[in-house]
Amino acid sequence: MPGGRLTQQERQQIALGLTDSLPYAEIARRLDRPTSTVTREVMRNGGPNGYRADLAHHATERRAHRRKPAPSRGAEAAPRPDGRDAQAVADYEEAFTTVVMASGLNRMGARVLTNLFLTDSGSLTASELAQRLQVSPASISKAITFLESQSLVRRERDERRRDRYVVDDELFFQATIASARANDHLVAIARQGVALLGAHTPAAVRLENIARFLDFISESITRAAEQAREVLRSRPSTATSHVPPGHSDQAATRS
């Protein structure tokens, strides 16, 4: 797997791939680079609609000049208390963060969420997060405030009366429901427009179709989340973890 920074020619190929609407994985394959490298490059430099190869290259050079020399990667990573491969976990954490960023979170929010997901306990204090990520408590506070507003984390008090930030199975369900409910405001404002503009005008018809579409999407997401809720509470096995709820008998019959 090639290492080192992207060259200007590679950035131009990324820009061409985005213009052709190629997925990140295909662009990465053509460059012989990890998909996470391409995803991170695009998200750091304007996103898929704003990426410009020359601007991205100059921005990377400026960041490199400002950045302090990084510690040598040749040194062996400090062992983890849980016995896991420290470097492999760090690489996976970076890849997971990049994917979460691609879903719409900023980098700090994505890093906080990733760290919570990858802890066995599913909970950390603000000071623990700040220490893990080597950032200020203010940065953690800002990220947590946004994640709470999206129902992606919740807080609880531990025995020492410290705030702990938690991700669990129920929260993931609640976040999905909250995402579906967020459409309700759009539905309401669209239907206000229908009444205002006149039910049979082209603009009103357009707004009513938008409202009906979003209503259908919200109901479908909510119904699917309710049906799949049990998946989050179960312990998957190797044999059945890929089988959707209600399909195990059919899968067994086919096998």
Image (cartoon, grey):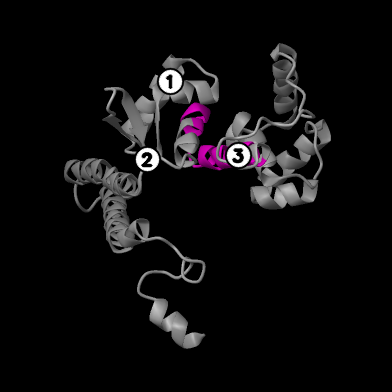
Taking depth in this image into account, of 219 and 223 the one nearest to the observer is 223
Percent of width and height locating residue 31: 79, 46
Secondary structure beneath dot 2 equals loop
Type of the residue with mark 1: Ser
Nearer-N-terminus badge (2/1): 1
Which residue, given by chain and number where applicable, does mark 3 sit on?
A: 48
Magenta span covers which residues? 88-111
Percent of width and height locating residue 171: 32, 44
**102, above or below 239, in the image:** above
- Give the dominant element type of the magenta stretch: helix, strand or loop: helix
Type of the residue with mark 2: Val
Which residue, given by chain and number where applicable, does mark 2 sit on?
A: 167
- Residue 161, picture quadrant: top left
Percent of width and height locating residue 189: 23, 40
Residue at image x 46%, y 70%?
240
Crowding at label 1, few (<14), some or many (≥20) Cα neighbours within 10 Å? some
Question: Looking at the rendered structure, which numbered label has been put on residue 127?
Answer: 1
- Residue 179, picture quadrant: top left
Nearer-N-terminus badge (3/2): 3
Type of the residue with mark 3: Pro
